[in-house]
Image (cartoon, rainbow, N blue to C red):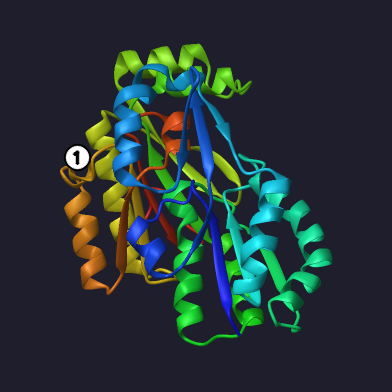
Amino acid sequence: MRIGLVVDSACDLPKDFIERHDIEILPIAVRIDGTTEVDYRDQAATLAFLDSHIAERGVNAETIPYTVEQIRDLFLQKLVIDYDYVFCMTITRTRSPIFDNAQKASYAILNEYRAIRSEAGNNTPFALRVIDTQNLFSAQAILPVEAVRLREAGEEPGRIRTRLEQLASSTYGYLVPRDLYYIRNRARAKGDRSVSLFSAALGTALDIKPVLRGYRGDTGPVAKVKGFDAATQQMFEFSARRVDAGLLTPTVALCYGGELDEMRALPGYTALRDACGANNIEMFESVMSLTGMVNVGKGAVVVGFAAEPHEFGKP
């Protein structure tokens, strides 16, 4: 059985991994002051757009995900011919309409695919499963990496589906932003009042950085640390301890809102890299997506992995 994998471009995986494993992308466009860039996970294009637009005007950006009709057309024109079963893994539905759009598109796809497959000489059934990863950025990447591993191991779709749905509720993403004012202003531009002006001003004045956690569709602070470097060090070193304690998949995924060498120079990065090496954990590193950077700002760093329930900062 030919199994296809689909992610949206907010999923922070290296482009070469996506291309090597024939992962299809649902692109997200970013529009700032009349300039539009479509994110196809091209690191060079992302960094160029970051330098020229996001740092100064990202607060007012509009993100434009694929519509129901665009998703339907992509599947009917290509994927229902190329594959027999497709897993579409999306950014958490609590932060984006992509999951709902894909779910709605799936009804039309499953009603209309037969004639298209028949024309291509294939009369076997086609199946599609849309899965909410319940997370963001590099934490979203844990599911497609596992799906690739299971597909290459010859697992059948039912077992892959069960495994991915279990992992979605066990995946953690930890994020440290650089600029609280940016996050506050970006949130207000989207109608989200969760970051108050007072909190942003106080945090900036005292150089307090939150460690934010994404888990089961919810995002919120789990620690406050003085200084960006100290906060990232605490996040990296805690993640290294989780690696030593044992993960649910052999994968850690990182992303950064800028050049990756800047991330690699941050305190604590080496401890996490070494823990992954010692435990045979594959570590993926990616420049953060355009969608991610316009929402959390330049220079933010994220670590994602799947693990047993735990509290940040505790052994």
Which quarter of the image is occupied by the C terminus?
A: bottom left
In the displayed structure image, the side of residue 289 where residue 66 appears, left or right: right
Which quarter of the image is occupied by the N terminus?
A: bottom right
In the displayed structure image, the side of residue 46 where residue 2 appears, left or right: right
Q: Residue furthest front?
A: 119
Which amino acid is tagged 1?
A: Glu
Q: Return the x and y of residue 107 as percentages of the image width and height.
A: 81, 59
Q: Return the x and y of residue 116 as percentages of the image width and height.
A: 74, 70
Residue shown at 46% from the left, 86% from the top: 153
> In the picture, residue 188 is in which quadrant?
top right
- Tell which of 54 and 162 is nearer to you: 54
- Tell which of 78 and 164 is nearer to you: 78
Q: Return the x and y of residue 197 as percentages of the image width and height.
A: 49, 12
In the displayed structure image, the side of residue 313 where residue 25 appears, left or right: right
Residue shown at 30% from the left, 36% from the top: 47
User: From this viewpoint, is residue 169 visible?
Assistant: no
Q: Return the x and y of residue 245 as percentages of the image width and height.
A: 35, 68
In the displayed structure image, the side of residue 242 where residue 96 appears, left or right: right
Q: Is residue 311 above or below residue 281?
A: above
